[in-house]
Amino acid sequence: MTVETIAPALMTDQYELTMVSAALRDGTADRHCVFEVFARRLPTGRRYGVVAGTGRLIELIRDFRFEPGEIEFLRSAGIVDDAAATWLSGYRFSGEIEGYGEGELFFPGSPILTVTGKFAECVVLETLILSVLNHDCAIAAAAARMVTAARGRPIIEMGSRRTHEHAAVAAARAAYLAGFASTSNLAAGRAYGIPTTGTSAHAFTLLHDDEPAAFASQVAALGKNTTLLVDTYDISQGIRNAIAVAGPDLRAVRIDSGDLSVLAQQSRELLDSLGATETKIIVSGDMDEYSIATLAAEPVDIYGAGTAVVTGSGAPTASLVYKLVEVDGRPVVKRSENKATVGGRKTAIRRHKPTGTATEEIIYSQGVPDHQTNDRLLQRTYVAGGEVLDTPSLAESREHLRQNLISIPWEGLKLSAGDPAIPVVIVPTA
């Protein structure tokens, strides 16, 4: 068996099954519990988080099963006893899941996912929930910052070679949700309907006897609506060769190295002098939100981002936690230093000015929200009685994030370190 063939259920951590086994023995496995996913703080320098991955997660929970071979492994390894093995063989999540929509912004303490049900059936999902949300939320937050820095110019996600093969597909989805225009990952294109794009690498140019021969081959195969990589040798000569081969109506040239600020200006001037005034300039090469921002005034048409986006641009995890906050209707809290929790099931609203600008997030613990005219409830139901409900499409979530980023004060979009974009107020249990 390889990692690729392991079912989601076996991604469970052993300590979760330890708790299940013990709870089954002492009779607490069926106690009614509420777990919440939240971040105690945002990554250094960030002013907001982005909810992403919920759609993927709900599908995984729907199909979360322990197959006979997996249960036999757990028994033979002494990880579970007979009672736990029997319980796992019949596992189906029968509780409720609600949470923030994909594309929603979150802040420290935001209850972005609430899982309600029997203790055992909820706790066994912890690793799956956190692995999906921590990854996708981190990617989406980094990508959203890049989109803001690009100021309306398209960004191509091209980081598949810089991460695990399965993470690459999830990262492409999260980046597209955050506003990227396309991806080079074909699996993501097929699975999620994301527009795909790509061009040749330096190897293709080096394969041929000279650069014009490589360009001619690519144009012959794909037509002039392609992108030619012009920095294998000399960029200026590469551009001349590209236009000589494809003509002035070549779609685009790509530059992947060097001082991109200077090269973008020089390349635009050269393209214009050759009559290729509509040929676009794509730049790539370790782009992140900061390098994209430095090119805001340069004649760049499209960016390509890889390593930074698929690694969260310095914050590879959203640092989300999954904590028990209520047992049989009674709030429970963790009091550990620097890791204290607020007990009770939370309800969250976003408060806005009449103009639509968000002013604060208010979180009620076991309380009824005090609604005002411009308040918006942040949570929706994803699973009820174990049944998965309809979820927003990726396109709808993408638009939801776009509107959310418009709604926060402009200071919240800065790339510099600062306070969260809006304050969070937690109203404790009365």
Image (cartoon, grey):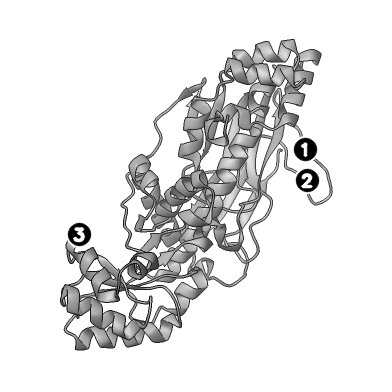
- Residue 374 makes an appearance in the image: no
Sequence-wise, which precedes: disc 1 or disc 2? 1
Residue drawn where x is 53% and y is 53% of the image: 163
Left or right of 65, for residue 256: left
Q: Position of residue 268 (x, y in %)?
A: 29, 83
Q: Nearer the viewer, residue 92 or 168?
A: 168
**Which dot, 1 or 3, sits closer to the camera?**
3
Q: Amino acid at mark 1?
A: Val
Left or right of 159, for residue 273: left
Of the 4 image quadrants, the one containing the C terminus is top right
For residue 51, the mark is none
Instruction: Report the residue marked by disc 1.
Output: 333
Q: Amino acid at mark 3?
A: Ala
Instruction: Report the residue marked by disc 2.
Output: 340
Left or right of 97, for residue 395: left
Q: CA distance from mark 1 to mark 2?
A: 7 Å
Asked whether the residues under the numbered discs 1 and 2 touch, taking CB atoms below 8 Å apart as contact, a structural biologist would say yes
Q: Nearer the viewer, residue 401 or 189?
A: 189
